[in-house]
Image (spheres, grey):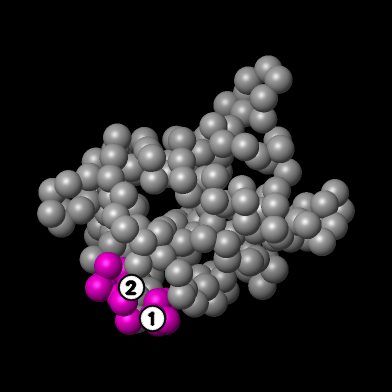
Amino acid sequence: RPVTADALGHLLESLRRAPVPGRSGFLYPSAGGLYSVQLHLYASPGRVDGLDGGVYRYHPDAHDLIAHATGIALDPAALHLGPVNRPTATSAAFTLFLVTDPADSAPLYGPDAEPLALLNAGYMGQLLCERAAGADLGLCPVHGVDFDPVRWLLPEGERLVLLHTLLGGIPADGTNGTEESA
């Protein structure tokens, strides 16, 4: 069954920036968001209520999804290089891609920009996994993803580096929460 807009909104709200005096505004360590990690979502056609199949960027200040390429379906077999993740990818309602443009934070962090962004992506992934159960969703962190089919759908996608990927949806067994990594 499709993921509701409310469930997806509840999950993504954990990444929303909210002004808090003396803090970065995020629920995860972020050095004020200077590590430049972006979340892009691929919604499988017909699997997320209110969203056309396609690629969106999450805007943490507005708590909104910005459409980049809609009306498309991506082939899970083309995205997932290892066969072990393909069944989960095929049944997923959405895929979350945590990416960075190292040039955004390189002026401040130099060669440490990408490793720091990777830490930030880990914090974000952990928070998303913790919040999934409260949205009656399951998330499965995966590796072995070919980001190129998504990269070329995004503005300045050639500069983006994939840091982490999570597959999401309503667990088939009726449980909620995070599945084991594949």
Tally of numbered tags: 2
Residue picked out by circle 1: 82
Picture disc at residue 90? none
Question: What residue is rendered at 29% in x and 35% in y?
Answer: 134
| Magenta segment includes 83 | yes
The image's mark for residue 85 is 2
**Over which residues does the magenta segment extend?**
78-90
Residue 182 x/y as whole percent: 35, 67
Few, some or many C-alpha atoms within 10 Å of disc 1 (few <14, some 14-19, many ≥20)? some
Local secondary structure at mark 1: loop
Tell whether label 1 touches label 2 (CB within 8 Å): yes
Q: What residue type is labelled 2?
A: Asn
Q: Where is residue 74 in the image (x, y as percent from the top left)?
A: 38, 74
Q: Which residue is drawn at 43% across and 44% down?
A: 128
Q: Main secondary structure of the magenta part?
A: helix
Q: Which residue is drawn at 31% across and 77% down?
A: 84
Q: Does the magenta stretch include residue 143?
A: no
In percent of width and height, residue 90 lies at 27, 71
Looking at the image, can residue 70 be seen?
no
Q: Can you say whether 165 is above or below 152 in the image? A: above
Q: In which quarter of the image is the N terminus?
A: bottom left
